[in-house]
């Protein structure tokens, strides 16, 4: 899979993408990454990419001309990329969006800066994403988050091919609680079932733990999770218990 970015600070990507899982994925050929400097598509000696907004207001806006030239030029080289912009107006990025993007062969992220972009630039986007209800200084961090989440889903990116299938949100629930050595730490013991060697019991405990954690921390996920009738009864009992403790 090929990731590309268009940014006014393309140098910020190399450190993270060259380390750990992302670096290994590049070295093994699972992903390819290329960063483009938006200023390469400017035509004045100051390499200007921003200007004051019409109507007044705070800050500067990214001009449409270099963005259009950059996206059209990059997109013309080889397979047409899936073009992604970031904006508070965008669709919320989640695990399902990551899964959908993992099926693309080439993704181009256009990273905004300053007070945002001229509205006309968004006509270039195949989709616009938002990481959440907060504001970042630029789209570079958002692009890194999306690339990381997508890369984990690609075959060969993780050492254990089942890792990405057994994480939070992969089945519509938070992941179950996990423990490692020592079995007892400061009076806190690992659940006995995890030491039993009985895989069926462990699987049942993990499913129950996932339900408990989701009901406690992200109950909104339960409405769309695939649950059996018995599991829905269990979740309802947890909710009733929680409401009773709050009174």
Image: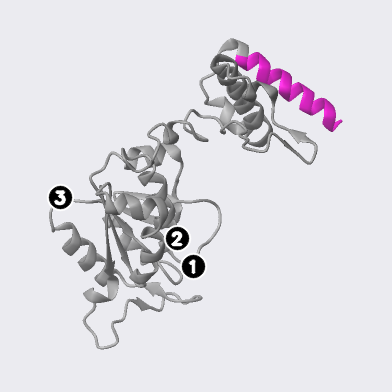
Residue interval drawn in magenta: 231-247
The tag earlier along the polypeptide, 3 or 1, is 3
Q: Position of residue 239 (x, y in %)?
A: 72, 24
Residue at the (60%, 16%) spot, across then down = 201
Q: Which residue is mark 2?
A: 141
On residue 214, the disc is: none
Circle 3 packing at 10 Å, graded few (<14), some (14-19), many (20+), is few
Q: Position of residue 222 (x, y in %)?
A: 58, 27
Q: Which residue is mark 1?
A: 137
Mark 1 → mark 2, Cα distance in angstroms: 9 Å
Residues 12 and 188: in front is: 188
Mark 2 → mark 3, Cα distance in angstroms: 25 Å
Q: Residue furthest right?
A: 247
Q: Looking at the rendering, in which quadrant would you find the C terminus?
A: top right
Above or below, 98 relative to 14: above
The total number of labels drawn is 3
Residues 152 and 195: in front is: 195
The answer to whether the residue labelled 1 contacts the one labelled 2, judged by CB atoms less than 8 Å apart, is yes
Please tell me whether mark 1 sits on a helix, a strand or a loop. Answer: loop
The tag earlier along the polypeptide, 2 or 3, is 3
Q: Nearer the viewer, mark 1 or mark 2?
A: 2
Circle 2 packing at 10 Å, graded few (<14), some (14-19), many (20+), is some
Q: Residue furthest top?
A: 229
Q: Which residue is mark 3?
A: 79
Left or right placement of residue 221 versus residue 11 in this view: right
Task: Indicate whether residue 242 is drawn in magenta.
Answer: yes
Question: Which image quadrant is residue 160 in?
Answer: top left
Above or below, 159 relative to 170: below
Question: Which image quadrant is residue 178 in?
Answer: top right
The answer to whether the residue labelled 3 contacts the one labelled 1, judged by CB atoms less than 8 Å apart, is no
Q: Position of residue 151 (x, y in %)?
A: 36, 46
């Amino acid at each position: 899979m090929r990731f590309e970015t268009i940014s006014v600070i393309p140098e910020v990507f190399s450190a993270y993408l060259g380390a750990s899982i992302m670096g290994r994925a590049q070295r093994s050929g699972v992903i390819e990454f290329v960063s483009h400097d938006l200023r390469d598509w400017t035509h004045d000696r100051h390499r200007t990419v921003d200007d004051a907004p019409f109507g007044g207001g705070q800050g500067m806006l990214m001009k449409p001309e270099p963005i259009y030239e950059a996206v059209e030029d990059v997109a013309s080289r080889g397979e047409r990329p899936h073009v992604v912009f970031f904006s508070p107006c965008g669709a919320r990025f989640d695990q399902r969006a990551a899964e959908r993007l993992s099926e693309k062969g080439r993704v181009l992220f256009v990273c905004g800066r300053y007070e945002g972009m001229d509205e006309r630039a968004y006509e270039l986007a195949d989709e616009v994403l938002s990481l959440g209800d907060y504001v970042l200084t630029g789209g570079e961090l958002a692009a890194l988050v999306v690339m990381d989440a997508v890369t984990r889903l690609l075959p060969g990116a993780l050492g254990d091919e089942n890792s990405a299938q057994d994480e939070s949100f992969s089945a519509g629930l938070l992941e179950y609680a996990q423990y490692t050595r020592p079995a007892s730490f400061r009076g806190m013991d690992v659940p006995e079932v995890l030491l039993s060697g009985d895989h069926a019991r462990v699987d049942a405990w993990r499913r129950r733990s996932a339900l408990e954690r989701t009901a406690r921390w992200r109950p909104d996920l339960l409405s769309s999770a695939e649950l059996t009738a018995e599991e829905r009864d269990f979740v309802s009992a947890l909710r009733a218990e929680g409401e009773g403790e709050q009174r």
